[in-house]
């Protein structure tokens, strides 16, 4: 009686489809949180610049804004940065933010350019130009 031993062949188990889905969801969540936190960082960073303070000063004193939103004019929580460059002594910005008051709210869009040989500032409120001239803040 010749009995051969039982041979068991082990095949690799294919990865579960469910684990792939969870890995993909985790990756999407991680990327979303990372990009979201970067966006929030840029949404707050412009608020600490001289350009933002200058634009806000003009907006709070503008008659069109005061008629639309009332007084006091309060800026929104975020200021969305389109671009901010600082190369040597040349600074350029473009950003937007919301303002609110007792009568309502509105959107402010601003662009500034500062250089030793010249400067400019453009401010729009709800699509209407409220300032187009020289950057006149310190």
Image (cartoon, helix red, strand yellow):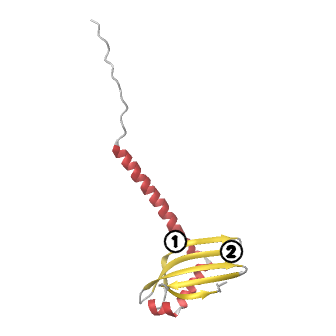
For image coordinates 37% across by 49% down, the residue present is: 22
The relative height of residue 90 versus residue 64 in the rendered view (above or below) is: above
Residue picked out by circle 2 = 90
Q: Quadrant of the N terminus?
A: top left
Helix, strand or loop at mark 1: helix
Percent from the top left, x then y, of residue 28? 42, 55
The percent coordinates of residue 106 (x first, y second) are 45, 84
- The mark found on residue 43 in the picture is 1
- The residue carrying pointer 1 sits among few (fewer than 14), some (14 to 19) or many (20 or more) residues within 10 Å by Cα, namely some
The residue lying toward the viewer, choosing from 19 and 129, is: 129
| Left/right of residue 73 with respect to residue 9 in the rendered view | right
Q: Is residue 120 above or below residue 23?
A: below
In this rendering, position of residue 33 left or right of residue 50 = left
Labels 2 & 1 near each other (Cβ < 8 A): no
Q: CA distance from mark 2 to mark 1?
A: 22 Å
| Picture layout, residue 99 above or below residue 84 | below
Q: Earlier in the sequence, mark 2 or mark 1?
A: 1
Crowding at dot 2, Cα within 10 Å, few <14 / some 14-19 / many 20+, comes out as: some
Q: Which residue does the image show at 57% across and 71% down from the upper left?
A: 83
Residue at 60% from the left image edge and 72% from the top image edge: 84
Figure check: 2 above or below 56: above
Foreground residue, 41 or 88? 88
């Amino acid at each position: 009686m010749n009995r051969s031993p039982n041979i068991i062949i082990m095949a690799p188990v294919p990865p579960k489809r469910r684990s792939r889905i969870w890995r993909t969801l985790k990756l999407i969540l991680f990327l979303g949180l990372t990009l979201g936190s970067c966006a929030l960082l840029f949404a707050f960073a412009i608020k600490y610049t001289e350009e933002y303070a200058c634009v806000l000063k003009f907006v709070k004193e503008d008659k069109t804004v005061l008629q639309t939103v009332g007084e006091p004019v309060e800026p929104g929580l975020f200021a969305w940065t389109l671009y901010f460059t600082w190369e040597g002594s040349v600074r350029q910005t473009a950003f937007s933010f919301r303002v609110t008051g007792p009568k309502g709210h509105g959107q402010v869009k601003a662009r500034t350019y500062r250089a030793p040989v010249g400067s400019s500032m453009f401010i729009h409120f709800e699509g209407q130009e409220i300032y187009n001239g020289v950057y006149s803040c310190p």
